[in-house]
Image: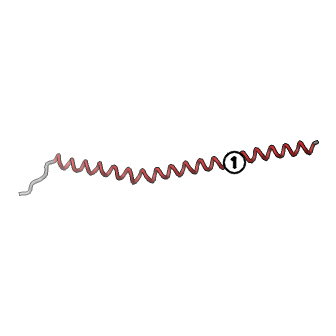
Amino acid sequence: MITIPETTSLLGYAGQLFTDLWVWLAVIIGLPLGFFVIQLMIDLFKQEFEEHKKRKALGRADKITAETKRLLKE
């Protein structure tokens, strides 16, 4: 005679399997996604810093040319 395990124990095993599977899927998807978002933020800050340096350099260039024009007029 073949005995079939109780339904509650089968559902318990299935629930435990999906609980463990959820953790692995979260790690497999979340870890690369987290690194991707961090890289995007680094690139964004790097780009903003480069634009800030350009604006600052242009501001200095404008001051130098204005100073040169004033000196040439004198």
The coloring applied to the image is secondary structure
Identified by mark 1, the residue type is: Lys
**Position in image of residue 57 (x %, y %):** 74, 48
Q: Which residue is the extreme one toward the bottom?
A: 1
- Identify the residue shown where x is 83% and y is 46%: 65
Left or right: where does residue 49 sit relative to residue 66? left
**Residue assigned mark 1:** 53
Q: Which residue is the extreme one toward the right?
A: 74
Say few, some or many: other residues with alpha carbon within 10 Å of mark 1 (under 14 / 14 to 19 / 20 or more): few
What quarter of the picture does the N terminus occupy?
A: bottom left
**Position in image of residue 70 (x %, y %):** 89, 42
- Identify the residue shown where x is 33% and y is 49%: 22
**Position in image of residue 36 (x %, y %):** 49, 52
Task: Answer with the quarter of the image where residue 74 lies.
Answer: top right
Left or right: where does residue 47 sit relative to residue 11? right
State the SS at label 1.
Answer: helix
Left or right: where does residue 7 sit relative to residue 38? left
How many labels, in total?
1
- Identify the residue shown where x is 67% and y is 46%: 52
**Position in image of residue 17 (x %, y %):** 26, 51
Left or right: where does residue 7 sit relative to residue 16? left
